[in-house]
Amino acid sequence: MKTGTSTAGTLKGIKNNRVEKPEDQPPKEEIQDLLRLLGWARDKVRRVRERELTRYGLNPDKGAVLIVIQNLGGSARTDDIARQIIRERHSVHELLRRMEKSGLLREIEGEHRKNGIRFELTEKGRAAYRLVVKRPLQLRIFSVLPRKERQRLRDSLYALYSEACEALGEKSLPLSSTFVRKKR
């Protein structure tokens, strides 16, 4: 894949390369190995992230919420947060209430709507966000891959994610909404 191509173009190319003939399907052992490696990598990177955040009294889920809210302009509804961090709405609601109780978030009064309560970062939450975005160990881990390989990995993982969403009858998030900061 070329560097600088759009994600949509890259994903179209990946989807067009889908194997249709049964004899061209990957062997079951190869799929098992890939699934095992994906799980191992995800678990280890998450443990590294937990270790980074524990010293600040945070965990990866709280860190993800802080990043999502900041990237959505400093406030967000429960449903928007749940969609971005790919968690069930009720689980996110409980997490947001715990974060509110610890002083990281504040519910915006009068914002009760059918698509969720709106929360904003407090000063303590903004300070925590600044700590969360420092990722020295994760940066070290991902720097093992050259830029082109990271881009190919991102595109391949997104293609797998999109295909899984399609198989579940769910809408996949556009890659840009997950990684690009929205302007205020």
Image: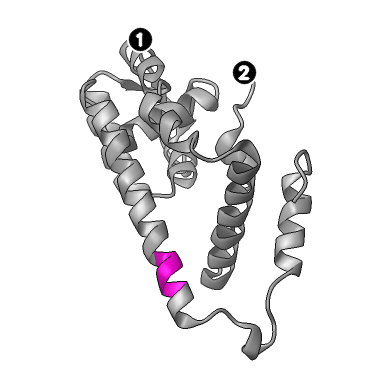
Marks 2 and 1 close (CB-CB < 8 Å): no
Q: Position of residue 11 (x, y in %)?
A: 71, 56
In screen coordinates, is 86 left or right of 164?
left
Mark 2 crowd level (few <14, some 14–19, many ≥20, 10 Å Cα): few
Judged from the image, the secondary structure of the residue bearing numbered disc 2 is loop
Examine the residues drawn in magenta and state their main secondary structure.
helix
Screen quadrant of the C terminus: top right
Q: Residue at x 35, y 42 (%)?
A: 45
Residue under label 1, please give it: 123
Q: CA distance from mark 2 to mark 1?
A: 18 Å
Quadrant for residue 33, please give it. Answer: bottom left
Quadrant for residue 101, please give it. Answer: top left
Q: Is residue 108 above or below residue 47?
A: above
Q: Residue at x 46, y 81 (%)?
A: 28
Residue under label 2, please give it: 184
Judged from the image, the secondary structure of the residue bearing numbered disc 1 is helix
Q: Is residue 10 above or below residue 128?
A: below
Label annotation for residue 85: none
Q: Position of residue 46 (x, y in %)?
A: 32, 42
Q: How is the image coloured?
A: one colour
Identify which residue, 65 or 105, lies in the foreground: 65
Q: Residue at x 49, y 40 (%)?
A: 80
Q: Residue at x 44, y 49 (%)?
A: 86
Quadrant for residue 85, please give it. Answer: top left
Q: Which residues are magenta?
A: 31-35
Q: Is residue 34 above or below residue 65?
A: below
Q: Position of residue 48 (x, y in %)?
A: 30, 36
Three-letter residue code for mark 2: Arg
